Amino acid sequence: MGTIVSTPNRWLVLISGSVFTFALSGTSAFSVFVSPLMEETSWDMGQITLAFTLYNIFIAVMGIIVGTVAHKIVPHRIVFTGSLFFGAGWILTGFATSVAMMWLTFGVLAGIGGGMIYNYTITSVLKWFPDRRGLASGLVIGFAAVGPVFAAPVATAVIEAKSVFAGFIVLGIVYAILMFIFAAFVRPPAEGYIPAGWTPPSTDSSVPGGVQLTWREMMKTSTFWLLFFVFVGAGTSYMMMLGAAATIGKEQAGMSVELATISVTVVALSNFIGRMIFGALSDKLGREITLMIAMAVNVAAMLSMSVVTNAGLFLALMALVGASGGALLALFPALVSDQFGAKYSTLNYAIMFTAYSVAALIAPQLAAFYRQSGNYAPAFMWAAVLTVAAIAALGIVMKKGSVSQRRSK
């Protein structure tokens, strides 16, 4: 039984965690850098977007590493070190003289920093709010969806006034300052912490009476690999928009530079709205059904994008892809907890999240490959096919039921 204490500073932890997810999500505006980089250098789209892919790979890998050793390290060291790597990665990208250097600075350095912070920050914040988990989760994860709304116009303004490399430097400085100001407040509570005036329920698990699977046990199940494929298949379309929305909008639908920049903001805001709407809908319909609906919306949007050339309609379809991506990111943490138990969910989800990195590897390269032919339509259709396959895989998971509950019988 924990000690009941009054902790008004937990709200400062929540605010600080939200600032961190806001800063980290600035990478989702990467697409505004793609065309200017192609214009200012001899690098092609595939080479440039590989930096974004590497970032997502390293953020996932470091998330797993930190999840296994965080309990052995002083919390502020994790956050300060991650902030240093992340800010330095952005700033040093502004001095990149080769695409390989950009892979190292943005992809590896910033990716390591982001991986040290992202999952650790979210789980630390949620531990302060066992009584208001929904509110805390909505705010800290929601801020991860609005970061590009700030990053895209700021980057575009700096790029137009100075250069594309100056855009990386300015954002890197802003993020580093924000992170160092709030880093001291991002830490988990003491073990057994209970907010004043709150009585814990009889069980802490999201699957009452269910078996709690470790990451090794989880990875031995077919359900894990089915869900992994769902994450990859459904995430590919969204990652394509994150990595190259502005470039695709300009080249496929003839968007102006201004509208292409706005498209990044639209995808980010629709992602935030999608998290809220589909999250609320899941309380009524269940997570799997809700995710299927979101993926069906995604399929319709991607197939439509393969034939639409009107800029306004294309922007609306981008918004639908963003909203379905929001559903994926909002529902998957709880889905993993439902299937494998809540006790080890932090590390279990960090491992599942590597599927997002696989999607980040596939999506930008798929878009870059078909860009060479002057037509993105086949890339959109392949993304739709992957999502249809993901729907089928999720259907199998639904039929099998919760692994945690099955093993408890």
Image (cartoon, rainbow, N blue to C red):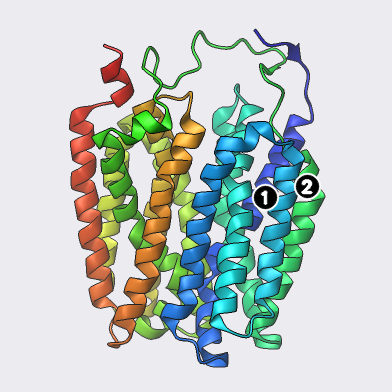
Q: Which of these two is toward me, 77 or 157? A: 77
Q: Residue at x 49, y 12 (%)?
A: 203
Disc 2 designates what residue? 182
Q: Amino acid at mark 2?
A: Phe
**Which residue in the protein does label 1 denote?**
20
Say which quarter of the image contains residue 41: bottom right
The residue lying toward the viewer, choosing from 155 and 344, is 344
**Does residue 204 appear in this view?**
yes
- Give, as a three-letter code, the residue at label 1: Phe
Does residue 309 appear to the left or right of 334 in the view shown?
left
* Residue 309 visible, this angle: no
Which residue is rendered at x = 49% and y = 87% of the image? 43
In the image shown, does 380 or 269 lie closer to the viewer?
A: 380
Query: Residue sitting at 18 percent across and 46 percent down?
Result: 392
Residue 323 placement (x, y as % from top left): 41, 54
SS class, disc 2 = helix
In the shown orientation, is residue 49 left or right of residue 114?
left
CA gap, disc 2 and disc 1:
8 Å
At 42% from the left and 27% from the top, the residue drawn is 214
State the image coordinates of residue 138 (x, y, percent, origin top left): 55, 39
| For the residues bearing labels 2 and 1, Cβ distance under 8 angstroms | yes
Mark 1 packing: few (<14 Cα in 10 Å), some, or many (20+)? many
x, y percent for residue 281? 37, 37
Q: If you read the primary sequence from the N terminus, does the residue marked by circle 2 or circle 1 appear first?
A: 1
